[in-house]
């Protein structure tokens, strides 16, 4: 019966391993669309425009806000981050699982707008110490930015209860297995409109 798509929101501190987890399960996820956000933050070494993010200026971002191009947007670590509405709607229409890597503010916006088809997971490291270690080991950010990310992470973990699921990424294999199980269930969520249609058809 199900023909429309579903949304899987992943949040958690930078350095918690969200991207590695997605990469690990990607071949088993079925048809999915990973939402590429737009940001005004500077590009990190190794990042690619159009793959990791669409990197734009603050002026371009503000223009997109005015033109209502974003499904949601937020200021994170002093930079704008936003999800464009058009590709998401197209992917949903094509019946895909749309995966978002967005912050706690973004999760609330998506939840408010698409509550019936959204599943949310908060992913984090086993401890703050481990997060600090991973951020330093990654070596992509300056100390000031690392400190920023750490204080942000402390604030974000306070909001874990806003999520339906919570994965502690201690053992990558185990965390990936849990992510896959949740993603499979996320796909089975039925939009309210389809349920209503089913009820009408069922009665006739
Ligand atoms: P990073 O700079 O490490 O790539 O991302 C910083 C934070 O911004 C992460 O928590 C990430 O989930 C969040 N983020 C990335 N894209 C978006 C977006 O489009 N919307 C929102 N609300 N947050 C985003």
Image: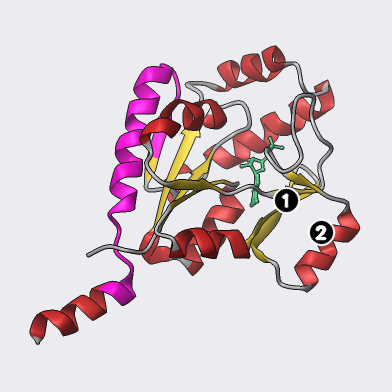
Find residue 127 and report its horizontal and vertical position in percent.
52, 21
How dense is the environment of label 2, judged by Cα within 10 Å: few (below 14), some, or many (20 and up)?
Answer: many
Looking at marks 1 and 2 on the same chain, the residue that comes earlier in the sequence is marked by: 1
Measuring 68% from the left and 58% from the top, which residue is drawn there? 73
Find residue 134 and report its horizontal and vertical position in percent.
62, 17
> Count the marks: how many?
2
Task: From the image, give the main secondary structure of the stretch colored magenta.
Answer: helix
Q: Is residue 129 above or below residue 156?
A: above
Quarter of the image that includes the N terminus: bottom left
Measuring 55% from the left and 37% from the top, which residue is drawn there? 12
Residue at the far bottom: name it: 204
**Residue 171 within the segment the image draws in magenta:** yes
Q: Is residue 15 above or below residue 156?
A: above
Camera-nearest residue between 190 and 138: 190
Q: Which mark is residue 38?
A: 1
- Quadrant position of residue 30: top left
How dense is the environment of label 1, judged by Cα within 10 Å: few (below 14), some, or many (20 and up)?
Answer: many
SS label for mark 2 = helix
Residue at the far left: name it: 203
Q: Is residue 12 above or below residue 97?
A: above
Measuring 32% from the left and 63% from the top, which residue is drawn there? 3
- Quadrant position of residue 143: top right
Q: Determine whether the beta carbon of the residue marked 1 sits less than 8 angstroms from the nearest atom of ligand 1.
A: yes
**Residue 186 within the segment the image draws in magenta:** yes
- Tell me whether the residue at label 1 lies in contact with that at label 2, contact meaning CB atoms closer than 8 angstroms: yes
Q: Which mark is residue 61?
A: 2
SS label for mark 1 = strand
Quarter of the image that includes the C terminus: bottom left
Span highlighted in magenta in the image: 166-194
């Amino acid at each position: 019966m199900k023909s429309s798509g579903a949304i899987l929101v992943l949040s958690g501190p930078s350095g918690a391993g969200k991207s590695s987890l997605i990469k690990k399960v990607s071949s088993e996820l079925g048809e999915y669309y990973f939402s590429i956000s737009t940001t005004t933050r500077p590009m990190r070494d190794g990042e690619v425009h159009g793959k990791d993010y669409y990197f734009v200026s603050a002026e371009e971002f503000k223009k997109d806000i005015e033109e209502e191009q974003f499904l949601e947007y937020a200021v994170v670590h002093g930079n704008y981050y936003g999800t464009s509405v058009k590709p998401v709607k197209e992917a949903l229409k094509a019946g895909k699982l749309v995966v978002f890597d967005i912050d706690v503010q973004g999760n609330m916006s998506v939840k408010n707008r698409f509550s019936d088809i959204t599943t949310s997971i908060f992913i984090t490291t086993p401890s703050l110490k481990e997060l600090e270690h991973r951020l330093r080991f990654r070596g992509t950010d300056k100390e000031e930015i690392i400190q920023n990310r750490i204080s942000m992470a402390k604030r974000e973990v306070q909001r874990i209860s806003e999520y339906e699921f919570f994965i502690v990424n201690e053992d990558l294999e185990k965390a990936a297995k849990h992510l896959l199980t949740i993603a499979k269930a996320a796909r089975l969520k039925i939009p309210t409109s389809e349920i209503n249609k089913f009820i009408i058809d069922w009665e006739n």
